[in-house]
Image (cartoon, rainbow, N blue to C red):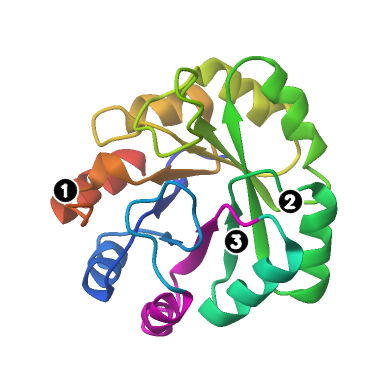
Amino acid sequence: MAEGKTRVKICGIKTLEDALAAAEAGADELGFHVGLTGARAPLEADNVAKIIAELPENVESVMVTSVTEAEQLIQLARKTGAQVIQLYGDATPETIGDVRKALPGIKVWKVLNVSDESSIEKAKEYQDSADAIALDTLNKETGVRGGTGKTHDWNISKKIVESISIPVILAGGLNPENVADAVKTVHPYGLDVNSGVSNPDGSKNIEKVKAFVQAAK
């Protein structure tokens, strides 16, 4: 991947105002928490649908969820109108296959929580079913997957980028200060940020979003 082409997803969008401001600031994808365990104030699918309907055409909508049942995932995706489903939780390659069969136009990103070198083999298990792998941080003390605001070992992430044939999106503890180093080290296809560009109440700090996009690209 050439320098300067890294895509940026701003996650945890809750309002149309934040969505449009983040898009204006250069975000390529916007993420909405729907049925996500541990999310601060997850959104109802109907609310997400209203925001997605107003997004500019050049911005992709991502439904971020820990639902693992294919039927429920298909229903939620149809309700929201999201173009991408980002799967936390233990959805299997078979489940992803079922979702893609029912929704041929949709992309599926599988989140993997990077803990050690075993994550490399885990990523390979999904490269025939998912469109991309998103790498997030596992909090080993609490067992919380993702949304930790902590980075993980980027050298493992770099090895995953080199080991699989589908795009890799880097998440976990990214912010405007460290994102340029992350891109240099890992060379991911894309970046996924939430808390690193958020205000204490979870709304987006648009100055930080701008700074993040500038440093990433």
In which quadrant of the rendered image does the N terminus lie?
A: top right
Q: Which residues are magenta?
A: 45-67
Earlier residue among tags 3 and 1: 3
Q: Does the magenta portion include 189?
A: no
Q: Nearer the viewer, residue 212 or 47?
A: 47
Nearest to viewer (mark 2 / mark 1)? 1
Picture quadrant where residue 182 is located: top left
For marks 2 and 3, give the CA distance. Answer: 10 Å
Q: Nearer the viewer, residue 14 or 1?
A: 14
Other-residue count near label 3 (Cα within 10 Å), few / some / many at <14 / 14–19 / ≥20: many
In which quadrant of the rendered image does the C terminus lie?
A: top left
Earlier residue among tags 2 and 3: 3
Look at mark 3 in the image and give the residue it sits on: 85
For marks 2 and 1, give the CA distance. Answer: 32 Å
Look at mark 2 in the image and give the residue it sits on: 130
Picture quadrant where residue 71 is located: bottom right
